[in-house]
Image (cartoon, rainbow, N blue to C red):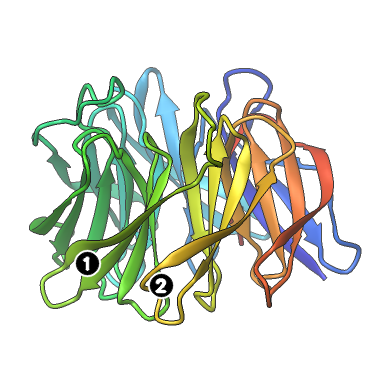
Amino acid sequence: MLEQMLLGTYTRRESKGIYQIALDTEKETLSDATLLVEETSPTYLALNQEGDLFNVTSVDGEGGMAAYKHHDGHFDLLNKVTEAGAPPCYVALDEEKQLVFGANYHQGIVHVYRILADGQLEHTDKIIHDEPTGPHENQDNAHVHYTDLTPDRRLVVCDLGTDRVYTYDVSAEGKLSEVAQYVAEPGTGPRHLVFHPNNQYAYLFGELDSTVTVLAYNAADGSFEQVQKVSTLPDGFNEFNGGAAIRISADGRFVYASNRGHDSIAVYATAKDGSNIERIQLISTEGEIPRDFDLDPSGKFVVAANQNTDNLTLYRRDEATGLLEMIQKDVYAPECVCVYFK
């Protein structure tokens, strides 16, 4: 069986845009990557149920979001909505409300776009964070790194610069209203977050201190509370590291987090109720700066993307133990920073 995935990239060196690659689950191999959409640094992307594409884009020095219509395996550009400054770094969808969310790291902005009847985008709202920033040198400003839906369809936002996780109500028109803030320990640098399937706990990746924080989620008011905080690094590791992607298995039994610097994936077993985690493995990504990775739909494989060495690594995943085994490496993928299974 072939499982298709899309690769978001920077286009600073060899990459030309968004690539497609297939995972053969019987042969347990990745095919060669092929260019699907020529774009300028489409670093993150998302597909709706019809297969239409929404991705980060840059046009003449302005950053924003692009919409493409899926047609017979190809994508036709509908429009691009941009503004002065750097492009966003994350894309998420609310298909129920027909909204697209973007996280702008460099400008500290949460963007909201409405999907119009013809599939084009229009900008509906933006929130600029102005809370105090953390003590780390990379916390010179607000740095929104993640925007996505909570299980109860609020919007949760991670801001690396302010050491905060924000929760917003979202109107049908795409307007945001803040309902809660979680303040992380100073210097954490909240980057990405995933929810346990029971919707009661979430796992926050701190980019700057290389930690995973277990958070209890209160659906009544959208608030988070810290329960546990653990490192993603081995004892005694004192070189540079930056946390990157975090994923959770469909059954909620295992959490995975990638280290840029140590260049590894940390594997955690979760408690039955999701309230705490224990690291059970650290495995090399066989490349430098694993910016992103993902579990395939079957849950039997993991694909990691190494940004600096332009390569993908394929792992077999033991569904019972959660442990990873490297089975293929050095699959060429230029400047890849997003792995997205279709």
Q: Give whichever of 14, 262 is nearer the camera.
A: 262
Residue 35 as seen in the image, left or right of residue 161? right
The residue singled out by tag 2 in the image is 196
Q: Position of residue 331 (x, y in %)?
A: 80, 40
Residue 118 appearing in the image:
no
Task: Identify the residue shown where x is 9% and y is 56%.
Answer: 178
Q: Earlier in the sequence, mark 1 or mark 2?
A: 1
The amino acid type, in three-letter code, at marker 1 is Arg
Of all residues shown, which one is farthest toward the right?
Answer: 27
Quarter of the image where the C terminus is located? bottom right
Q: Quadrant of residue 216?
A: bottom left
Is 336 above or below relative to 270? Answer: above
Task: Identify the residue shown where x is 81% and y is 42%.
Answer: 329
Is 58 above or below relative to 170? Answer: above
Task: Identify the residue shown where x is 31% and y is 65%.
Answer: 98
Question: Could you say whether the residue bearing mark 2 is in a helix, strand or loop?
Answer: loop
Q: Position of residue 86 (x, y in %)?
A: 34, 25
Q: Position of residue 83 (x, y in %)?
A: 26, 28
The answer to whether marks 1 and 2 mark residues whose Cβ atoms lie closer than 8 Å is no
Residue 240 appearing in the image:
yes
Q: CA distance from mark 1 to mark 2?
A: 16 Å
Q: Position of residue 135 (x, y in %)?
A: 21, 26
The amino acid type, in three-letter code, at marker 2 is His
Question: Could you say whether the residue bearing mark 1 is in a helix, strand or loop?
Answer: loop
Residue 179 as seen in the image, left or right of residue 78? left
Residue 12 as seen in the image, left or right of residue 206? right
Q: Quadrant of residue 260?
A: top right
Q: Looking at the rendered structure, which numbered label has been put on residue 154?
A: 1
Quarter of the image where the N terminus is located? bottom right
